[in-house]
Image (cartoon, coloured by chain):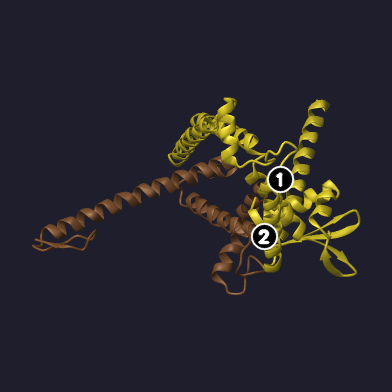
Chain colours: A brown, B yellow
Amino acid sequence: MGFGTCLRKLAKSISSQNTFIAAKEINGIKIFENSIDFSKIQSEYLSYLYFYKSLYEDIYSKKVSEKILNDEIYEDAYSYYKSKHEDKKDDKSKGKQRKIQATFIKDNTKIKFPENNKEVK
Amino acid sequence: MDNVREEIRQEEIKKISTQINDEYNIDKIRELIRSNKKEFIHNDKTYRVRLLNDNEKDELNILTKKRLNSMIQEKDEKGNYVWLHIAELIKIYKERGTVDIEKIDSGINKATKKFQSANFELGEALANKAGENFLKSYKEELEQSKSELESLIIEKGHYLESSVEQQIQNYNAKCISYLCLDVKEENSWIRAFKSIDDFIKADDKLVNLASLYAMALHFGV
C-alpha cells in the first residue's frame, strides 16, 4: 500500500474523523504539532479529512450508499460528480439572480449597467 | 475437506498479514503528518527526515541554480550543447519525424476529457443508486480511460526525461532529500552527508528511503 492510500485510509478512519471534529470544536485538541506553515503532506491530509467528512455526511443523510467507501474509485467519482453538480446549481442560481436584477432595472427609468458604470435613459 | 480448510486458513493469514502491514504503513505516515519529521533506523544508525528551514531553502536555491548554470553551458567534444530544453527537444523530434509531442499532448487532452466524463458518469450512477452491473461497467470504462491517460503521460515524460527542465527537477528533489536528512550522533542531530555528491553516492536503500519521506513532506503523496 503506497503512501497515498495510507494517507486516505488514515483520514477516512473514524478516530481521525473524530479528532478532526473535536479539534474544530475544542480548543487545545490539535491534529498536528504545528498550527501554521503546513507541509504539503499535512495540507493533503487536511483535504482528505474534509473529503471524507463530506462523504460520511452524505452517507448518513442517505444521499449515497455506504458501499462507495469500499472503493477509492467510487469515492473519487462521487465527489467529482457532486462538485460538478454543485457548480451547475451555482450557475443556475446566478442566472436567476441576473434575471431578477434585469427585471428590477427594467421597472426603473434610469438604469445603471454594472459593466461600465454609465447611466442611460 | 482439509484442503478447503487449509485454503481458508491461508486466506485468513494473508488477510491478517495485509492488515498488519497496512497498519504499519499507516503508523509510519501518521508520525510524518503529526510532526513533519520521520525517524528511521538504517544499518544501526538513526536517521531523521524533516522539513527544510529557511537557510536550507536558500542553500537549495544555490545548489539548483549552480547545477542549472553548469548544465546549460556544458558542451560535448564536438562543441554541441549536452543538455537541451524541452522546446528544443520537441523541435528535434519533429524534424526527425520520430515523435510528435503535440500529438501526444492532444491525446492527453482527449484522454483527460474522456476520464473526466467517465468519472462524472460513475459519480452520477452512484448518486442515483444505480445497480451493481451498471456501476461495474462505468468503473471499467473509467479504469480504461485512466490507464490510457496514464500511459500517454508516461510516454511524454519518457521522451522529455533528458530535458534540462526535467533533469533540474530531479536534481532539486535529490538536493531536498540531502538537505533534510539528519543522523543522530551522541544524542544530537547533524546533517547526514557532507555534500550532495556524497548523498548521491550513498547506499541506495538509504537514499531511496530518505527521498520517499522527503518527497512526501515537501511535494505530497
Going by the numbered disc 1, the residue's amino acid type is Glu
Q: Assign the N terminus of chain B to one quadrant of the image.
A: top right
Question: Where is A27 relative to B170, above or below?
Answer: below
Q: Which residue is rendered at x = 84% and y = 60% of the image?
A: B194
* Crowd tier of the residue under label 1, counting other residues whose Cα lies within 10 Å: few below 14, some 14–19, many 20 or above: few
Q: Which mark is residue A69?
A: none
Find the residue positioned furthest to the bottom: A27
Residue visible at 50% across and 43% down in the picture: A65
Q: Is residue B183 left or right of residue B138?
A: right
Residue at image coords 30%, 49%: A92
Instruction: Using the image as rendered, state which of residue B115 and residue A119 is in the foreground.
Output: A119
Q: Quadrant of residue B91?
A: top right
Query: Mark 1 vs mark 2: which is more N-terminal?
Result: 2
Q: Which residue occupies 21% across, 53% down?
A: A99
Nearest to the observer: residue A23 or residue B193: B193
Look at the numbered disc 2 and give the secondary structure of its residue. Answer: helix
| Residue B117 % position (x, y) | 45, 36
| Amino acid on which the number 2 mark rests in the picture | Asn
Q: Which residue is mark 1?
A: B74
x, y percent for residue B124? 44, 39
Instruction: Specify the subunit that label 2 lies on.
Output: B
Is A52 positioned to the left or the right of B39 in the image?
left
Looking at the image, can residue A58 be seen?
A: yes
Q: Residues within 10 Å of mark 2 (few under 14, many from 20)?
A: few
Share a chain, discs 1 and 2? Answer: yes
Q: Position of residue B138 (x, y in %)?
A: 50, 31
Residue under numbered circle 2: B61
Chain where mark 1 sits:
B
Q: CA distance from mark 1 to mark 2?
A: 20 Å
